[in-house]
């Protein structure tokens, strides 16, 4: 069984992690923090360049539409041909029903479909 003479001696903290070991561990921690900081900064810089490129593209498209005189949907020849084919006007109730969308809360739908797949 168990002996009554159980002795346990704890090692001093200096033997677990000496000065040299402490410097190694702290150096690794600082290096990991620097690498993570650099990676996060790089991701932010890439994100900003993508946003700026998209913004420049949208401005270019907008200027092109303004040069062509297409600043509103009723100025577009394709849209006007649809109005002509359907014998309606831009403010007609039929076009309102065909072109306008409505918001429907779909949170309940997502819960129902998730429950059906389980």
Image (cartoon, helix red, strand yellow):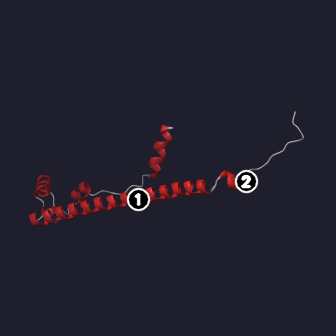
Residue depicted at x 61% and y 57%: 19
Residue 61 location in percent, x, y? Answer: 17, 61
**Closest to the observer, 33 or 81:** 33
Residue depicted at x 44% and y 60%: 37
Assign a secondary structure to mark 1: helix
**Closest to the observer, 61 or 68:** 61
- 3D distance between C-alphas at marks 1 and 2: 38 Å
Residue depicted at x 44% and y 48%: 109
Q: Is residue 45 left or right of residue 111?
A: left
Q: Which residue is mark 1?
A: 38
Q: Quadrant of residue 99?
A: bottom left
Q: Is residue 92 left or right of residue 21?
A: left
Quadrant holding the N terminus: top right
Whether residue 72 is visible? no
Q: Which residue is mark 2?
A: 12
How many labels were placed on the picture? 2
Q: Is residue 78 left or right of residue 18?
A: left
Residue 14 location in percent, x, y? Answer: 68, 55
Residue 113 location in percent, x, y? Answer: 46, 43
Q: Is residue 105 left or right of residue 68?
A: right
Could you classify mark 1 by the number of other residues whose Cα lies within 10 Å: few (under 14), some (14-19), or many (20 or more)?
Answer: few
**Closest to the observer, 61 or 47:** 47
Residue 35 location in percent, x, y? Answer: 44, 56
Residue depicted at x 88% and y 37%: 3
Q: Quadrant of residue 55?
A: bottom left
- Foreground mark, 1 or 2, reads 2
Check if mark 1's residue and mark 2's residue have beta carbons within 8 Å: no
């Amino acid at each position: 069984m168990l002996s009554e003479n159980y002795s346990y001696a704890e090692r001093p903290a200096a033997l677990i992690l000496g000065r040299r070991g402490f410097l190694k561990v702290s150096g690794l921690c600082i290096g990991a923090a620097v690498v993570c900081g650099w990676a996060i900064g790089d991701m932010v810089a890439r994100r900003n360049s993508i946003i700026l490129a998209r913004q420049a593209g949208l401005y270019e498209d907008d200027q092109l539409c303004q040069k062509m005189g297409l600043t509103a949907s009723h100025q577009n020849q394709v849209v006007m041909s649809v109005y002509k084919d359907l014998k309606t006007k831009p403010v007609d109730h039929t076009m309102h029903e065909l072109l306008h969308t409505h918001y429907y809360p779909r949170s309940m739908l997502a819960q129902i479909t998730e429950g059906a797949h389980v």
